[in-house]
Image: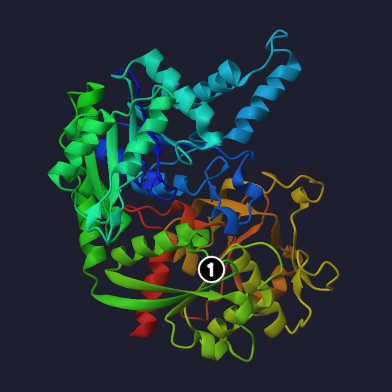
């Protein structure tokens, strides 16, 4: 079968959930026996989000091949259970950078370089890369932003050209819009959707399917009205009502017939009936927990939960696996100190310290580690969280009061965390960290080995600083064990304190490999430990 292409666009307002719709449709098609992948086209001019503040863009997601991408790729992987790559995220910055590099090399033979055809051709090339691998029956492409945004126009034009080149049996457009409810009039309003579709039509694109985000059930008359004024089949007007959890959306979309409409319009007649039993089993466990735990996440960017999106979703996956409701409290690290740590953190069943950059809130994170260690509360550190665990141990167990990371205290005499040797001659910031999946060898008879059940694992990284092995012998002699090492560089990947009920910290980001049907073992073990601690 020739690869089919589906574009997901949005209108009226941002944050409607294009990524969730793309992920849900991908899951439905996958459940019917089709091979599916999803990519994101981001209109911003940054080459990638690597240098963006988390408050600006939410978390940066990292793929196995080291691409720093939009957080929507996390949704794609969590829903599909498939590893994505650099090819699954394209930005305007990358597009223009590629075109300008070609122009400098003379690839355009002296022609004037223009948005059409050069920029749109480059966009089309990146869209078709995944289909050209012959690995996928369907490639779903989400276009970031909203229809009518200046920065999105080249992407809409590239979509128009692809639809013309491939035909609507091979390339279709799903447009997501918002139907607001005006309480004073007791009425749902379709005019924003109509105007949004007009923006698309002005760009030469007639949407094939409309997905209407709404807080109230749409009547048959509302759907008919939208179909009439937007020139789409009535059956192709799909309601997307607010759901208690994003993981219900695939089931709701199936009930609305979205997957059937897509298969019909793409001429795919040999797809299987959807097999969603495992997905429903996950939802059943998530909705019917037998116990509950309270987890404190002591971080730097807690005012924007999207900064910790993958961690929060990993708690959902691990909670369902343990049939346990996980209540997460995001605590600003800047507000934690030695005097108030008990007040802030007492009563929690587990404490997690996540990653981050910069010295703001570092002392609060270190205090959170101390409180967890001294009170034997289950502790889980990730990336900077591991580095804080190392610093706290050096200060309060080894007695090095000035112990620190050279990221925050370059002149400290006890550099227990230092810049990686491979990073010392790097000057640029974007995309230059230690990125992507690296192997880790786990020692036998350790908590890490008990959790993973094997000696060699692969986990994703995004960091510049590492544990300083000059101190390793002293740490291990005093009770902190390096239970996981990179087999090539000897870099410490996992530390734990065997004398504690559950104290483990990792240099990598396990949250990036947790999915609905395959919760990450570290998160599963942490929630189990928190549950045992509560009992």
Depth check: give the residue in front, 145 or 353: 145
Query: Do we see residue 328 in this rendering?
Result: yes
Depth check: give the residue in front, 138 or 457: 138
Residue occupying image coordinates x 22% and y 28% = 263
Q: Kindly indicate the quadrant of the structure image that contains residue 82.
A: top left
Q: Where is residue 137 in the image (x, y as percent from the top left)?
A: 32, 26
Residue occupying image coordinates x 56% and y 49% = 439
For residue 472, above or below residue 6 = below
* Left or right of residue 300: residue 325: left
Depth check: give the residue in front, 165 or 177: 177
Count of marks, rendered view: 1
Quadrant including the N terminus: top left
Residue occupying image coordinates x 37% and y 52% = 515
Q: Position of residue 123 (x, y in %)?
A: 53, 25
Quadrant including the C terminus: bottom left
Residue under numbered circle 1: 303
Q: What element carries label 1?
A: loop
Q: Position of residue 393 (x, y in %)?
A: 66, 78
Residue occupying image coordinates x 69% and y 45% = 430
Q: Where is residue 80 in the image (x, y as percent from the top left)?
A: 35, 43
* Left or right of residue 135: residue 429: right
């Amino acid at each position: 079968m020739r690869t089919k292409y589906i574009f997901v666009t949005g209108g009226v307002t941002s944050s409607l959930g294009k990524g969730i719709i793309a992920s849900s449709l991908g899951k439905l098609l996958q459940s019917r026996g089709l091979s599916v992948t999803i990519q994101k086209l981001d209109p911003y001019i940054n080459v990638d989000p690597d240098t963006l503040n988390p408050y600006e863009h939410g978390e940066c997601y990292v793929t196995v091949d080291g691409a720093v991408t939009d957080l929507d790729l996390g949704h794609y992987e969590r829903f599909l259970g498939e590893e994505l790559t650099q090819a699954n995220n394209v930005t305007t910055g990358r597009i223009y950078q590629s075109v300008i590099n070609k122009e400098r090399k003379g690839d355009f033979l002296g022609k004037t370089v223009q948005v059409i055809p050069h920029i749109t051709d480059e966009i089309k090339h990146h869209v078709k890369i995944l289909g050209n691998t012959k690995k996928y029956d369907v490639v779903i492409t989400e276009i970031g932003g909203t229809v009518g945004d200046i920065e999105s126009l080249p992407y809409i034009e590239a979509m128009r050209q692809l639809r013309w080149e491939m035909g609507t049996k091979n390339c279709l457009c799903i447009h997501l819009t918002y139907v607001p409810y005006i309480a004073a009039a007791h009425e749902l309003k379709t005019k924003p959707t109509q105007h949004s579709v007009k923006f698309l039509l002005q760009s030469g694109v007639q949407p094939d399917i409309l997905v209407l985000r709404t807080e109230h059930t749409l009547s048959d008359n509302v759907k008919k009205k939208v179909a009439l004024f937007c020139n789409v089949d009535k059956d192709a007007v799909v309601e997307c009502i607010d759901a208690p959890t994003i993981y219900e959306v695939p089931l709701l979309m199936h009930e609305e017939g979205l997957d059937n409409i897509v298969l019909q319009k793409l001429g795919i007649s040999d797809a299987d009936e959807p097999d969603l039993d495992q997905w429903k089993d996950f939802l059943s466990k998530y909705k019917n927990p037998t116990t509950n735990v309270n987890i404190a996440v002591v971080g730097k960017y807690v005012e924007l939960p999207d900064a910790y999106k993958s961690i929060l979703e990993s708690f959902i996956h691990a909670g369902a696996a343990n049939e346990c409701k996980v209540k997460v409290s995001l605590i600003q690290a800047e507000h934690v100190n030695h005097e108030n740590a008990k007040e802030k953190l007492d009563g929690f069943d587990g404490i997690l310290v996540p990653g981050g950059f910069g010295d703001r809130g570092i002392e609060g994170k270190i205090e959170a580690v101390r409180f967890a260690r001294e009170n034997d509360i289950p502790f889980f550190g990730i990336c900077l969280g591991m580095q804080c665990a190392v610093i706290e141990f050096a200060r309060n167990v080894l007695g090095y009061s000035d112990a620190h990371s050279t990221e925050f205290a370059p002149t400290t005499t006890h550099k227990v965390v230092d810049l990686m040797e491979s990073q010392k001659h790097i000057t640029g910031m974007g995309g230059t960290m230690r990125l992507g999946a690296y192997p880790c060898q786990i020692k036998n008879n350790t908590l890490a080995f008990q959790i993973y059940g094997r000696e060699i694992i692969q986990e994703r990284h995004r960091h510049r600083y590492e544990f300083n092995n000059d101190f390793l012998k002293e740490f291990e002699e005093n009770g902190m064990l390096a239970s996981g090492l990179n087999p090539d560089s000897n870099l410490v990947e996992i530390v734990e304190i065997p004398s504690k009920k559950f104290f483990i910290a990792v240099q990598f980001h396990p949250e990036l490999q947790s999915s609905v049907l395959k919760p990450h073992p570290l998160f599963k073990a942490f929630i189990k430990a928190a549950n045992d601690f509560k009992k």
